[in-house]
Image (cartoon, grey):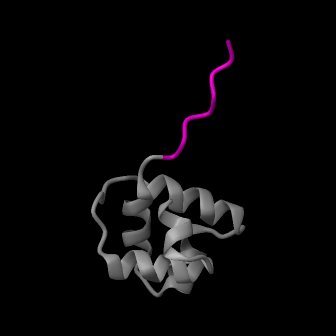
């Protein structure tokens, strides 16, 4: 029986997937989202597991997607 790919479970995993879909580097997304590169890197690596709503909103705007698309 073939295993299904695991569904991304953390916000960091979801951001990474969307960022790659959009063809952006971490640096590029951080600039577009107007957040520090280190903040984005920590979120994507799950070092920061509870980013603020403001930060997540900026990231979704930088990705040009809705908060709902990012979090669902």
Vertically, is 62 above or below 39? below
Q: Position of residue 10 (x, y in %)?
A: 41, 51
Q: Residue at the location (67% across, 12% down)?
A: 1
Vertically, is 8 above or below 56? above
Q: Position of residue 66 (x, y in %)?
A: 55, 77
Seen as rendered, the residue at the extreme top is 1
Viewer-proximal residue, 64 or 44? 64
Viewer-proximal residue, 39 or 12? 12
**52 to the left or right of 22:** left
Q: Position of residue 25 (x, y in %)?
A: 62, 68
Is the stretch drawn in magenta largely helix, strand or loop? loop
Any magenta on residue 66? no
Q: Residue at the location (44% across, 57% down)?
A: 12
Q: Residue at the location (31% across, 54% down)?
A: 47
Q: Residue at the location (47% across, 63% down)?
A: 71
Q: Image quadrant of residue 51?
A: bottom left
Vertically, is 10 above or below 58? above
**65 to the left or right of 39:** right
Which segment did they paint magenta? 1-8
Q: Position of residue 43 (x, y in %)?
A: 39, 62
């Amino acid at each position: 029986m073939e295993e299904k790919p695991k569904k991304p479970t953390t916000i960091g995993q979801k951001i990474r997937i969307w960022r790659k879909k959009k063809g952006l580097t971490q640096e590029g997304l951080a600039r577009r989202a107007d957040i520090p590169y280190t903040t984005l890197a920590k979120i994507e690596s799950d070092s920061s597991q509870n980013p603020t709503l403001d930060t997540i909103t900026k990231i979704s705007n930088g990705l040009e997607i809705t908060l709902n698309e990012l979090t669902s």
